[in-house]
Amino acid sequence: MLLHKYVIIFPMSKIRIAIIGVGNCASSLVQGIEYYTDNPNASGLMYKKIGQYKIEDIEVVLAIDVDSRKVGKDVSEAIFSEPNCTKRFSNVPRKGVIVKMGNVLDGVADHMKDLIKVDLSQSSIDIVDELKKSGADICICYLPVGSSKAVRFYAQACIDAGVAFINAIPEFICSDVEWSKKFSEKKIPCAGDDIKSQVGATILHRMVTRLIEDRGHKIDNTYQLNIGGNTDFLNMKDESRIVSKRISKTNAVTSILDNKDIGVRIGPSDYIPHLKDNKVCYINVKGTQFGGVPFELDLKLSVEDSPNSAGVMTEIIRSLKIAKDRGLSGNINEISAYAFKSPASQIRDDQAKKVFEDFINI
Ligand SMILES: NC(=O)c1ccc[n+]([C@@H]2O[C@H](COP(=O)([O-])OP(=O)(O)OC[C@H]3O[C@@H](n4cnc5c(N)ncnc54)[C@H](O)[C@@H]3O)[C@@H](O)[C@H]2O)c1
């Protein structure tokens, strides 16, 4: 039998990214691109290749921040500037990408004004123009929690500039029908909201509570306490800024449970400066087992917070580029359900991984 083989050859291309917010997450992402380019077989990555794309294909072409210790510096230097405190695991050579001044809006909380040094004499660049000039394919929003106006401002700038959008923060953009429609109308894909770390508190809590229900026990109540010493945790000391964070983290767990009528408290709990970027999470579950007998489970997770989300971000970037290459638009739920705490539609993690792999392998 004669087999006809059709080989489709895609041109190898770079994925040009813009970063909004050059904080600890951006630092780990930029370091990670360098690290896995130099050590392609090193552990810590879930997918070496997604479609045709390797990590080394990701290239930062634009970086925006408002802190005067970062603005004006090459991105390779800005990622290690204070108050960033995540671990240095890679040497990043000069990139020739100078961090530009963004639009502050509600990005800097009142109680953070002594720590985030904004030079008010500096005016914001024209974001739409800079996005267009940079040739960015995808823009990542890494703003502080509670930047409700700022995230919408940058999302709209991406729509106006025709740039795909990734929302790493707990503001409901890609999961919102109206925003997703706006991206669809401009034929731009987006993925979000609130990135789910590789082995973090959310996926662990989801897995363990599902395990308990799948094995026939009943959950009566659960809590998840999180402490850390980075600027993300300091920012989240203001309870008024973390309303959406609590909703995002709580729904991420309760949405996949059969019995939602339980006592639940999940969210950021305290800022402990000496922990720096080390996040510690405590999960407790109480319930009833066979014969109505009570049980209790306690779990502690201690991880470097920012690298824990950077690996997942490298997957989101590469899969969203695939969506862009295929001409898809609006929220790409195959990516969002896998990689974010608040996708438009929630599915269990084992199913989400399958759906994601089907999507990237087509
Ligand atoms: N594992 C994780 O690290 C993880 C997981 C889920 C979500 N997130 C979210 O990702 C976001 C980024 O986290 P991070 O640890 O890098 O925070 P960070 O505080 O280290 O960085 C935020 C950066 O944004 C800058 N910024 C503030 N206002 C701005 C504006 N208007 N325009 C441009 N830049 C502005 C700040 O100067 C800072 O450099 C947070 O919202 C965090 O909650 C992180």
Image: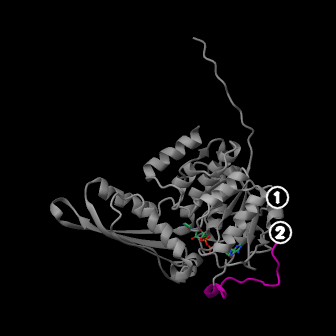
Q: Give residue 183's position: percent from left, percent from top.
A: 69, 55
Quadrant of the rendered image containing residue 256: bottom left
Query: Taking the image as drawn, is residue 34 in sight?
Result: no
Nearer to us in this view, 309 or 251:
251
Q: Residue at x 60, y 51 (%)?
A: 332
Mark 2 nearby-residue class (10 Å; few <14, some 14–19, many ≥20): few
**Magenta stretch: residue 189 in it?**
no
Q: CA distance from mark 2 to mark 1?
A: 10 Å
Nearer to us in this view, 300 or 255:
255
Mark 2: secondary structure: loop
Say the numbered circle drawn on residue 45. none
The number of discs equals 2
Is there CB contact under 8 Å for labels 2 and 1?
A: no
Query: Taking the image as drawn, is residue 248 in sight?
Result: yes
Q: Main secondary structure of the magenta part?
A: loop
Quadrant of the rendered image containing residue 98: bottom right
The residue to which callout 1 is attached is 132
* Residue type of the residue flagged with mark 2: Asp
Q: Residue furthest top?
A: 1
Q: 170 above or below 161? A: below
Q: Give residue 304's position: percent from left, percent from top.
A: 52, 68
Nearer to us in this view, 303 or 111:
111
Q: Is residue 328 left or right of residue 103?
A: left
Q: Residue at x 59, y 61 (%)?
A: 176
Q: Quadrant of ligand 1?
A: bottom right
Magenta stretch in the rendered image: 110-125
Q: 171 above or below 58? A: below
Q: Is residue 245 left or right of residue 68?
A: left
Identify the image quadrant of the C terminus.
Answer: top right
Quadrant of the rendered image containing residue 115: bottom right
* Residue type of the residue flagged with mark 1: Lys
Say the numbered circle drawn on residue 126. 2
